[in-house]
Image (tube, rainbow, N blue to C red):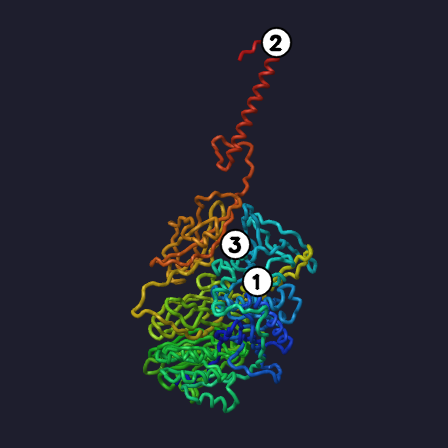
Amino acid sequence: MRVFKSLVLLFLVPVVRGSMVQLKNGGYEDIVIAINPELPENHNIIRNIQDMVKEASTYLFTATKQRFFFKAVKIIIPLHWLTKPEYLSVKTESYDKADVIVANPSLKYVDEPYTQQYKGCGEKGRYIHFTPNFLLNDSLHNIYGSRAKVFVHEWAHLRWGVFDEYSYDAPFYLSVNSGKETVEATRCSADVTGKYIFQSCTGNSCMTRDCEYDQQTKLYEAGCKFVPEKTQNAPASIMYMQSLPSVVEFCDQSTHNEKAINMQNKMCNYKSTWEVIMNSTDFSNTSPINSTSPPFETSFSLLQAKDRVVCLVLDVSGSMSEVIKQKYSHLDGSEIVLLTDGEDRGMNSCLTEVKNSGSIIHTIALGPSAAPELEQFSDMTGGLKLYATDTVNSNGLTDAFSGISSRSGNIFGQSIQLESTAQSVAVNQRMHGTVTVDSTVGNDTFFVVTWDGSTSPPDILLWDPKEKEYRTSNFTVSNLNLRTARLNIAGTAEVGNWLYMIENNHTESQVISMIVTSRPASLTDPPVIVKAHMNKDTSDFPIPMVIYAEVSQGFLPVLGATVMATVEQETGSAVELRLLDDGSGADITKNDGIYSKYFTSFKGNSRYNLKLRVQGRNQTVRLSHRQSRALYVPGYIENGEIKMNAPRPKPSDEDIQAKLGSFNRVATGGSFVVKNVPLGGFTDMFPPCKITDLEAQFEEEKIHLSWTAPGNDFDEGQVDRYIIKMSESLLDLRNTFEDATSVNTSSLVPKPAGTKESFQFKPEYVTIENGTIIYFAICAIDNASLTSEVSNVVQVALFVSPKESLPDSLPKDVINDDVNVSVIVIGALIAVLAVLISVSITVCILYKKNRKGSFELRM
């Protein structure tokens, strides 16, 4: 009860929740599109959303060969917009778990639609982000295409886990067709035609010309753009350039461009987008519809957010609905926090009632005996699933309540957890710590100390960054909150490190905890926030789990943070892991603010709880770029005339690389369940993870390969050895890796997981000629002979640099191996001929003299 009584002091941090979309007979229902509460009222946004989705339904139906369409959509309208009779109340829908959000851009003038997608191929994304300007400004149609086409492009990211088929990082690649070497734009399909244009602008004046080759890369120069013909015959692909009028399909096996260096090939093992869609559960659960158009027109429900209502329930009685109805006429949109630590055989009897109530149920399982059916309440209502161990030195229950955040999307109204720690402190011993208050927070800052022994508080001493002291007497101990002391810092808390020291003055050891929360310091500068979750709620052993932490300021990713994950379980000690944003292992994209790690330390069939601790230091910066976004088309060629769009907006360095200083954050990621773990332990069943960041270069007649080392168990530990294969055929290397030519790796000693590997060698059995392209891939093998998946495939184009001309004379003892044999032979013949000519001339001269002077010439 000590913890319960202190809950009123705690504030809330964001946590990720999943989509509630349903697919019925090919029609997607319960799609939620939420308008951010910061946006001013504008009903054209609602109207254009409706027009976009209606048109997109027909486009999707055609693109999926008469299989899918959009049947029912819910639009959440902000609380502060004027109420209208047609607006219904929200029920289990909310901004924070919407499928599509409409919010201001992460940076000014950057209206790129994108999907927050950081899982693997075929796995669902988090949400689609449209800006108000994208929905209102028709001039963007020429850049991205119609809103309907863009929506289908992003829906494919979100729902089916496919990736973009273009690349800003590698816009061109070398290809050899019928013995001819060409530079191609990274695209799918390769049948999309166009020209390679370089545009340079000074002020409002721009000039265009054909692109030139870069002699070092053998590709087009930096800044070169592929400008497509407006009129095309190519029907694919929606994941490349959906803006083209001819594009009405996803690339399939017959049109897919396997050579293109893009995320779709990298993440999906060179499968086409249509192949990935066909492998989805959506596809397997539907059949083609015998119609040329969707069988239903999209219907819309307009829902308006309302004030938040939360009820804490410590049992499963009917009293939970009675409490809410004392003030409100219905349960729609209300939230119930259900806490239990034991079995309850009657839960199944009220599932239907709960489902129809319109209320969101957050469940907290306390200890190992909580009913296994508990999570069903959360699953059917879209609530959180949380778990807390009942050990005395754990803040799990406190963190669970802190994770039940506001669902409105208003980050400026939320409180953020800066610290949550607890430890057992012996008699007359002290608990020390440091909490950093950064510049993005500081209002309504609370320091809360709890203890579990005596009724009187321990000795508390707190210093702010300017060394102002706060003692126990400055803390408030309420009669309603026994064993809890709190301190509210007046105004805006000082930015910097706050130091605390708490001494146990009790006669016995006791558990002491420190919880610190704060609100944003201003209404214009968004705070740094952390969202934590697992890749799924339930795992069947030996399938690994993946831990994700999204660290951002507004919509901008925050880089350079140290992210530590603690996984608590019902039995055994907690496991601590460091999450990385390095584009390897579980992390699919480097420097996107998504920190990831595999979790394989399963100790049994039970619930597990996730907690994150995030620290930022002065080098932390923000960047603007997002993966999985609609392509910014540079222009079109119409009737032979080049018509360029305005250059893609480039945010200033000040906007994208602002230093944030130091910060601390704590977040809960909810709970997950692991099943089918063998009793009595298990042998090594986890192979090294797939290498996804293999890179290759050709320099000085040597191949240079680099990648991030995987681990013995996915991305943890150290592998035993590597297998590197090479081939002049990408398809052969991908499909028959074992049969490809091996590279001698006897000198390659693996490094620990997460370390950068580098290996160079001179290719054998390959004639180095201009235009030769070799492909490479790699596998890792652990000490149990378990093998990783084949890595991404990289290509190397071999070039022989032209040699400098030789000097007029060379030392007689110098032999230049680089001189062509034919040149030597020709040179020798010329020398012999010169000698013969010289001898002949001499003979002639002497002969004439002999005749004139009657001399006898003897040979």
Classify mark 2: helix, strand or loop. Answer: helix
Q: Secondary structure at mark 3?
A: loop
> Can you tell which quarter of the image residue 787 is in?
bottom left
Location of the N terminus (image quadrant): bottom left
Mark 1 and mark 3 in contact? Answer it, CB < 8 Å: no
Badge 1 or badge 3: first in the primary sequence: 1
Left or right of 277 in this view: 606: left
Tell which residue pokes out farthest to the bottom in this image: 326
Question: Which element is circle 1 on?
Answer: loop
Residue position marked by numbered label 2 in the rendering: 853
Query: Label 1: how many residues lie within 10 Å, few (<14), some (14-19) or many (20+)?
Result: many
Q: Which amino acid lies under the numbered mark 3 shown in the image of this protein?
A: Lys
- Percent position of residue 647, x then y: 64, 61
Where residue 25 sits: x, y (%)?
51, 73
Q: Which residue is mark 1?
A: 249
Task: Give the amino acid at mark 2.
Answer: Gly
Which of the 4 image quadrants contains residue 203? bottom right
Q: Earlier in the sequence, mark 1 or mark 2?
A: 1
Name the side, left or right, on which 197 lies relative to 99: right
Comparing 503 with 850, the one in front is 850
Q: Which residue is mark 3?
A: 259
Give the residue displayed 40% in from the left and 86% down from the top: 315
C-alpha gap between disc 1 and disc 3: 19 Å
Residue 258 appears in the figure: yes
